[in-house]
Each structure stands twice: as structure tokens, then as C-alpha cells.
Image: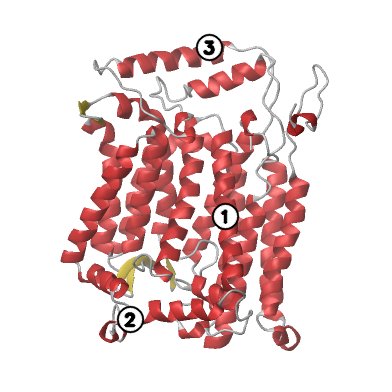
Amino acid sequence: MSSAAMNAPTQAPGEKMVPKPRRITEFLLLIVALVIGIGANILVDPDRLVEDPTRIITSGAVLAGGGLLIHVVLWIRARHADPYLLPIAVTLNGLGLAMIHRIDLSTGQTASDTQVIWTGLAMVVACVVLWLLKDHRLLRKITYISLLLSALLLLLPMVPGLGVEINGARLWISIAGRTFQPGEIAKITLAIFFAGYLSTNRDLILLAGHKIGPVRLPRFKDTAPMLAAWVIAIGVLVLQRDLGTAILFFGLFLVMIYLATGRATWIVLGVALMLVGGFVASRIFSHVSQRLDSWLNAFEPEVYNRPLGGSGQIVQGLFGLASGGLFGQGLGQGRPDLVSYANSDMIITAFGEELGLIGLGAILSLFLLFATRGMRAALGTFDAFGKLLAAGLSALMIIQLLVVIGGVTRLLPLTGLTTPFMSAGGSSLVSNWIIAAILLAISHTARRPTLTGPATDEDYAELQAHAKATREGRGTNNETVDPEPTTELSSSVAGTRDASEDAGTATEAISRIRGRSGSPSPDPTDSTPEGGRP
């Protein structure tokens, strides 16, 4: 017998193991997160704590008050939510406030004051989302509304008198003297649309259509809404001159369709289209060709000294990372003010210079932990929509971080995307806290105890409706379907075409039947994924 089995907790016959809410664990980790964030804000300039402590006290109070408020809302509305997501988000937000404050001390700006206001607002919005989103499956009812809302949000900056152009990109709208980037919210609504559409039409995309060699091409009518979303993403590149947002949207599209179908051919086809589109864009649009030139020839003097679209920002960022070394210069001891937009696009280089490779590695590990907790929520929930939405939002965070890190280290062209939770910018901060709130709501559904009791007539009706809808969907294709390998997550996504709006999925119904028929509840510990609850 293995040591793990010997050390497993014993369970008396008939005794039910109920998953622990673990809100105390979250509270203790939240205290640690606040100590890190507020402590970093003090360390950037300890003398300020004595001379003028108002800014530090205000930012610390907002961060602590917002974090504790979300914790209380979770205790009331989502007791079984993941206990690690909130502390990680608060830690990253606090470090971002500290670095923006540190850069303000060098440049004479006041961006940290605005960021503190946005932090409080973003945390309040997260509380509202958690309070209203009792069941994440409610978002499935607005699948097509989300697509229309995404199009509207992305077109708002093109409205005369409302949209403003900054640094050659038209991504912002101006309201009462404040700028906001609607595309940050659009990435969430697009993720909701993809999750709702793919969870409903997965079988039709996989089974219906003509097969050419090893590739089965879906019917146009089954993929038209997704193609519309893809066209919207390309329109961002063409109309708004923003390479980073276009890459982010297209990456989200590829990740979610791969998770739903498990077919690598979608990735190959998508990457090929992206390369072709990038090549064509570099030949047509000057701002894209300048970005590529600054990436490939960054150290050429004429490229470095170019007034618009030059590589000075990239090169200075690389020098900052190099001067940080392994342990860094120390908070408040570097020169991040030499890098353009050090508090937003290039904030990673500021952390690399002052915290070194070890400190920057710790920050990246926090992002990795945040994404893996989101993936665990995706694996733990029983409904296909929740799986795709949680996995898509987690992947969105990683894609954005990958593009940012690749840009500042010259592995990829610099795109201008911001680092989640850390960069200056209210729209980015609000959208990332909304993502955290949605992941917390999904994790609550994944971790909460399963109801027990006999299966109801409603459960059997859902199973019959699902079976009928599946037979009708597969009846439209007379060809034999070749089995293809799927990923663990995509194979657990039970995409269906519902017979009615509230029919649900077979996975949901089966899970309730198993629970009510007396099956034991899953192990509450985080080390046993077999139970289906992280």
C-alpha cells in the first residue's frame, strides 16, 4: 500500500465528506498579500512615510478595504470559492501600486493617485459581479448579446467626438476628461460568447461538414458567428491600429476552439492565418512595419533614434533588465524613469531592474498560480460552459502576459499591451478584477458540496432532451466520424445543442443524479483531482 493511501483520512461508513470553505485560509493569505503590497509601497521611499505618509496610508487603506470587502462578499455569496485567487490578485495589485508610486517619485507624475482610485473602483465592481453572479451559468443566456456588445465596445473609439487617438492608436474613449479603453471589457464579453457558442455547438462543429484528408471542415453556418468574432478582431488591427489587442483576441479564439474540440488542426490553421495576416499587414500598414523593424533592428542607430516608432523604449528596457542582474538594484534604487511608459507598457522592466531575476521570477510565478487555479476551477465544474469560460479567461491572462514579456525582452514585437493588475490604467485594472470575480464564482460552483437524494423527473427529462438533440445534430451528417485525441479539458467539455434554452447539459444532469443517488462527496483536499473539485 502506498504512503499516500496509508496517510489518507479515514471515513466511517455512511459519513459524508463535505468540502471545506477555506475562507480562513484565504483571510490569512490576504493578510500576507497586504503586508507585501503595502510594505513594497513603503520601501520605495521610506523617508516619505515620515515626511508625508498620506499617499501611502491612502493606497494601503484602499487596497486593504477592497480586499477585505471582497473577502466578506465571498464569505456570504461564494463560501466555497478558491481561497488563493483573491490573495494573488491583491498581491499583484499592491506591487503594481508600489512601482507606479516609485516611478512617480522619479518623474514627478501623479499616476499612482489615479491608480489608487481605479483600484477601489475595480474592487467594488468585482464585489458587484460576485454578488449578482450567484450562478455563472446565467451568463450563457447572453451568448449572442455578448457578441453584439463586443462589437459595440470595439467600435466606440471610432465614434467622432467620443474616441481619442493616443500614440497613433485609436483605442480610447473620453468621458468627462477621463479616458477608458472599451477593448478591455470586450475581451471578457468575447470570452463569454465563445464559451456559450462552443459549448452549445461543439458536436455540430466536430461532426457536420465535409472531410478533406485528415481534416474535417465544419459547415459555414456552424462557424459563421465565430468567424464574425474573428473579423472583429482583425478590424481592430485595421481600423484602430492596435497590434496587441488583435493578437490577444485571435489568441483567445484559437485557445477556446481548441479546448472545445481538442483538434490541433485548428491551431495549425489559426497560426498559418495569423502569419499570413501579419505579413500582409506589414506590407500595407506603416505602423505594423515600424513595429517589426524596431523588433528586428533594435540596435541600429537610425532605428533607435527614430522619433516615431523607434526602438529606444525597447533598448532602454533591455538595459534596465540587464542592470537588475540576479538580485536587483533594490526598490527605489534603479532608474526606470529612463524608459518610456515605464509605469504601463514597460512596468515589467522596472520590476526586473529593481527586484532582479529572482523577484521578477516570483511575480511571474504568481501569474502562473493564478492561471492554474482558474484551470482547476474549469476542470472541477460540471457544465461545459463553465469549463470553457474559466479556461478561456485563464488562458487570456497568460496570453496577455506572454505578449507583454515577449515584447519587453525582444522575443516578440512590442505591442503595447499592459501587464494584468500591475500596469497603470483603469480600464485594464477593472477588466482584470472582473475576470478574477468570474473565476471565483466558477470555482465556488466547482468546489461546493454535491446535493444528495434520489434523481428527479427533471433530471431524466434533461438527459432525454440532450440525447434527442444530439441524435438530431448527428443525423445531419452521414459520414463516419474518425476518433481524434483530445486534451483532458476538452474531452470533459460536453458541448451540446440544447432542445430548449434551459435544458442544460448531460454532464450537469448526470452529476446531480450521481449526487442524489447517494454517491460519496468528493475529497475536500486540493491534492485529489479525481473528485472533480480543486
Quarter of the image that includes the N terminus:
top right
Task: Provide the residue designation for mark 3.
Answer: 460
Which image quadrant for residue 94?
bottom right
Q: Do the residues labelled 3 and 2 touch (CB within 8 Å)?
A: no
Q: Mark 1 and mark 3 in contact (Cβ < 8 Å)?
A: no
Report the residue at 28% width, 76% height from top: 297
Report the residue at 66% width, 42% height from top.
81
130 above or below 36? above
Q: Residues within 10 Å of mark 2 (few under 14, many from 20)?
A: some
Q: Distance between the residues labelled 1 and 2?
A: 44 Å
At horizontal 31% and vertical 72% (from top left) the residue drawn is 295
**Could you classify mark 1 by the number of other residues whose Cα lies within 10 Å: few (under 14), some (14-19), or many (20 or more)?**
some
CA gap, disc 3 to disc 2? 67 Å
In the image: residue 294, left or right of residue 422: left
At which x and y percent is residue 197?
Answer: 37, 35
Q: Name the residue under label 1.
A: 125
Label 1 element class: helix
Amino acid type, residue under disc 1 in the picture: Val
- The residue that label 2 is drawn on is 299
Q: Is residue 310 left or right of residue 60?
A: left
Mark before the other along the chain sequence, 3 or 1: 1
Q: Measure the C-alpha gap from mark 3 to mark 1.
A: 39 Å
Answer above or below: position of 383 versus 176.
Answer: above
**Colour mapping used in the image:** secondary structure
Count the marks: 3
